Image (cartoon, rainbow, N blue to C red):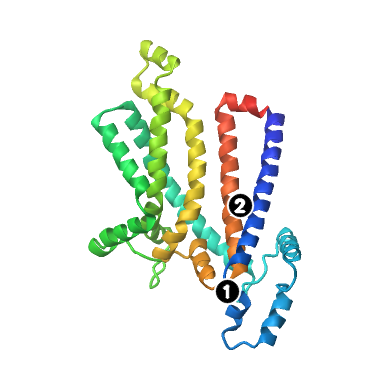
């Protein structure tokens, strides 16, 4: 079994490298299509043609696209993410702290998704076609349809402006920065907003797979033998339903990483999404390329972990791995 899992991990790691390579090609080509000259943006409107040409040559932007990409890829392999065009700092020094803040926000949202979405789906499945089931599925459908920016404005209006319970921006209080408690207070609103759509998706899928799991023959046998319903639902049926739930959770991590860019802008969260927004408006290509690559890396790593968990949970998947 251990040898099979090692082989599976090696194949998945190879696929992950190919995905990241493809993302790097796409990001590099898309950046070439962005209107505007990043060098002119960096030097300002008063820059002369000679100074622009000199900077382009210094950055290698006067070379053919293929040669530019090869140089870019070679730098990535060596850990060189280039230098920001607008801030004149190494991209790694800008992106890494921002990525950590984004992961904190996405992790907080994911916790909310799991704490609310999975139990809601399970309870709805155990009360199929009841008023609770219909109400829960209506709310999840509404949640999946809500624009993220609209939800952000609503929670700010209600919980920050009207009730004054929670702060609306930043990670810490600017006047008196606190510790973990201050961070959690600032995390609640953006994480809850980011979690609205993924929670709805997880709840609907959990209900669907739990309804199917509760109709299996071995579940009927357990009921016939007098096993308590709570134990049947939360121990036996949920265990069978976990593989597809784990898969959908892994996919929702990708949604969270992509969706928090709006959340970070609205809540002034100092994360990678907000930095990408600023870099896009200033046409800072090195930061954009590094940010997208890091988001893709986190996404594929999380889905690799999800695939491993599914393989450990589902015997049929373990046989397919072999």
Badge count: 2
Badge 2: residue crowd in 10 Å (few <14, some 14–19, many ≥20): some
Tell me the mark number nearer the camera, choosing from 2 and 1.
1
The numbered disc on residue 14 is none
- The secondary element bearing badge 2 is classed as helix
- The secondary element bearing badge 1 is classed as loop
Image coords of residue 170 (percent x, y) = 41, 66
Image coords of residue 264 (percent x, y) = 44, 62
Judging by the rendered image, the residue that carries numbered circle 1 is: 36
The numbered disc on residue 297 is 2
- Please indicate, yes or no, whether residue 267 appears anywhere in the rendered image: no
Q: Earlier in the sequence, mark 2 or mark 1?
A: 1
Residue situated in front as seen by the camera: 63 or 274: 63
Image coords of residue 16 (percent x, y) = 65, 46
Q: Quadrant of residue 24?
A: bottom right
Image coords of residue 296 (percent x, y) = 59, 52
Residue displayed at 58% across by 76% down = 86
Q: Quadrant of residue 121?
A: top left
In the picture, measured across the screen, residue 124 lies left or right of residue 279, that is left
Residue displayed at 59% across by 31% down = 311
Residue situated in front as seen by the camera: 166 or 141: 141
């Amino acid at each position: 079994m251990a040898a099979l899992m090692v082989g599976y991990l090696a194949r998945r790691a190879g696929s992950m490298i190919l995905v990241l390579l493809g993302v790097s090609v796409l990001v590099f080509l898309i950046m070439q299509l962005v209107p505007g000259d990043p060098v002119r943006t960096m030097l300002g409107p008063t820059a002369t043609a000679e100074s622009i040409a000199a900077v382009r040559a210094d950055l290698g932007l006067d070379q053919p696209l293929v040669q530019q990409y090869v140089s870019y890829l070679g730098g990535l392999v060596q850990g060189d993410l280039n230098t920001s065009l607008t801030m004149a700092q190494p991209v790694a020094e800008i992106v890494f702290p921002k990525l950590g803040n984004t992961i904190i926000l996405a992790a907080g949202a994911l916790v909310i998704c799991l704490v609310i979405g999975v139990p809601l789906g399970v309870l709805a499945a155990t009360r199929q076609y009841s008023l609770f089931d219909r109400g829960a599925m209506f709310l999840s459908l509404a949640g999946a349809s809500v624009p993220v920016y609209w939800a952000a404005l609503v929670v700010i209006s209600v919980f920050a402006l009207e009730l004054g319970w929670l702060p609306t921006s930043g990670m810490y209080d600017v006047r008196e920065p606190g510790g973990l408690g201050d961070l959690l207070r600032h995390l609640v609103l953006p994480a809850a907003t980011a979690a609205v759509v993924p929670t709805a998706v997880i709840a609907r899928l959990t209900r669907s797979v739990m309804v199917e799991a509760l109709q299996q023959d071995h579940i009927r046998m357990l009921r016939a033998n007098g096993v308590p319903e709570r134990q049947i639902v939360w121990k036996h049926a949920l265990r069978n339903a976990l593989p597809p739930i784990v898969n959908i959770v892994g996919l929702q991590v990708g949604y969270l990483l992509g969706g928090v860019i709006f959340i970070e802008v609205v809540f002034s969260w100092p994360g990678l999404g907000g930095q990408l927004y600023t870099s896009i408006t200033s046409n800072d290509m090195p930061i954009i390329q590094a940010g997208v690559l890091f988001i893709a890396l986190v996404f594929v790593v999380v889905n690799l972990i999800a695939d491993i968990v599914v393989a450990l949970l589902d015997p049929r998947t373990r046989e397919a791995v072999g």
